[in-house]
Image: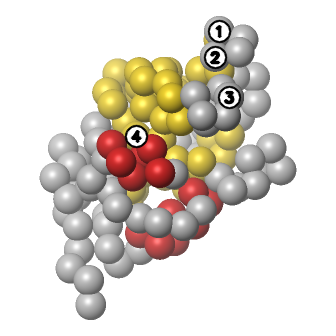
């Protein structure tokens, strides 16, 4: 969470699983990848606090490169790792992410909320004024 916050224009605090809800009314959110957007992962048994990663490059509608920390190991920062949308609807609700320990895409699917867009997102999303 600290790493994603430090490299992105999305400035949210709290556990990663809470970023999606905390972004409501502050940042635009959606299901389409955009460079600079934060992909917010749901909390699961395997990752109870959720996860957040920053999109560094959109390859196509179902493939992006991510920058993130603590995925393949505690304290490990990874840049430009592949994430693939494996959801049936093509809405990025389930992804597989590069896992360094196996040098391949992870075997498990990880559920996500979607993307939180920074103010200057290439997707045209804008930060909303705080009330």
First in residue order: circle 2 vs circle 4:
4
The residue that mark 3 highlights is: 73
First in residue order: circle 2 vs circle 3:
3
| Mark 2: secondary structure | loop
Instruction: Determine the CA span between mark 2 and mark 4.
Output: 17 Å
Instruction: Determine the CA span between mark 2 and mark 3.
Output: 8 Å
Mark 4 crowdedness (10 Å alpha carbons): few <14, some 14-19, many ≥20:
many
| Extreme residue in the bottom direction | 131
The residue that mark 1 highlights is: 103
Front tag of 3 and 1: 3
Colour theme: secondary structure
| Extreme residue in the right direction | 45
First in residue order: circle 4 vs circle 3:
4
| In this view, 103 is above or below 32 | above
Residue drawn 27% across and 90% down?
A: 131
Q: State yes or no: discs 2 and 3 in contact (Cβ < 8 Å).
A: yes
The residue that mark 2 highlights is: 100
Residue 54 badge: 4
| Mark 3: secondary structure | loop
First in residue order: circle 1 vs circle 4:
4
| Mark 4: secondary structure | strand
Mark 1 crowdedness (10 Å alpha carbons): few <14, some 14-19, many ≥20:
few
Q: State yes or no: discs 2 and 1 in contact (Cβ < 8 Å).
A: yes
């Amino acid at each position: 969470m600290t790493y994603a916050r430090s490299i992105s224009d999305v400035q949210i605090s709290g556990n990663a699983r809470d970023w999606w809800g905390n972004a409501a009314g502050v940042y635009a959110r959606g299901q389409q990848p955009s460079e600079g957007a934060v992909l917010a992962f749901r909390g699961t048994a395997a990752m109870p606090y959720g996860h957040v990663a920053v999109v560094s490059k959109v390859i196509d509608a179902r493939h992006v490169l991510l920058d993130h920390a603590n995925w393949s190991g505690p304290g490990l920062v990874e840049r430009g790792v592949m994430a693939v949308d494996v959801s049936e609807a093509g809405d990025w609700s389930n992804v597989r992410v590069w896992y360094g320990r196996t040098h391949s895409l992870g075997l498990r699917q990880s559920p996500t909320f979607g993307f939180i867009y920074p103010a200057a997102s290439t997707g045209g999303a804008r930060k909303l004024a705080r009330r």
